[in-house]
Image (cartoon, rainbow, N blue to C red):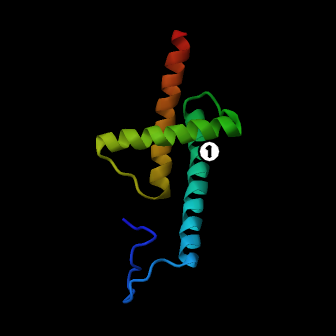
Amino acid sequence: MVGWDCPRQGSAEGKSHSTADKHEIKGVHTMEFIWFILIGIAAGWLAGQIMKGGGYGLVGDLIVGVIGALLGGWLFGLAGIAAAGLIGQLVVATLGAIVLILLLRLIKKKA
């Protein structure tokens, strides 16, 4: 595990990370978050199209896609399947969003 006080890799002196390194790592997390949101929007929209219900608007697609991404990641993890890369993440998120839409439709039908 990498921590802020861990010795720098390749450093003979074992100095801790500099402020510049901390900002670089923070920037990486920001980009991951932005990609997560963009994949969520795309997955929500794709799931809406596949399920013949149309999209749910930008915010609705985002919510369905992000929750679907979490659900898909959890389901794939239970099955021992790992998805890599942008396409793999989009597939997992879309399948999770489809499962979420199915569950929401079942709940709505019973209500």
Which residue appears at 53% of the width and 20% of the height?
105
**Quadrant location of the C terminus in the rendered image:** top right
Asked if residue 23 lies left or right of residue 77, the reply is: right
Determine the residue located farthest toward the top in the rendered image.
111
Q: Position of residue 39 (x, y in %)?
A: 57, 49
Amino acid type of the residue tagged 1 in the rendering = Ile
In the depicted view, which residue is nearer to us: 31 or 84? 31
Q: Position of residue 93 (x, y in %)?
A: 49, 43
Q: Position of residue 48 (x, y in %)?
A: 59, 33
In the depicted view, which residue is nearer to us: 32 or 80? 32
Which residue appears at 60% of the width and 37% of the height?
63
In the depicted view, which residue is nearer to us: 33 or 88? 33
Q: Is residue 35 visible?
A: yes
Quadrant in which residue 57 is drawn: top right
Question: Eyeballing the image, is 32 above or below 62?
Answer: below
**Quadrant location of the N terminus in the rendered image:** bottom left
What residue is pinned by disc 1?
A: 41
Tag 1, which secondary structure? Answer: helix
Asked if residue 60 lies left or right of residue 19, the reply is: right
Q: Residues within 10 Å of mark 1 (few under 14, many from 20)?
A: many
Which residue appears at 48% of the width and 24% of the height?
103
Quadrant in which residue 15 is drawn: bottom left
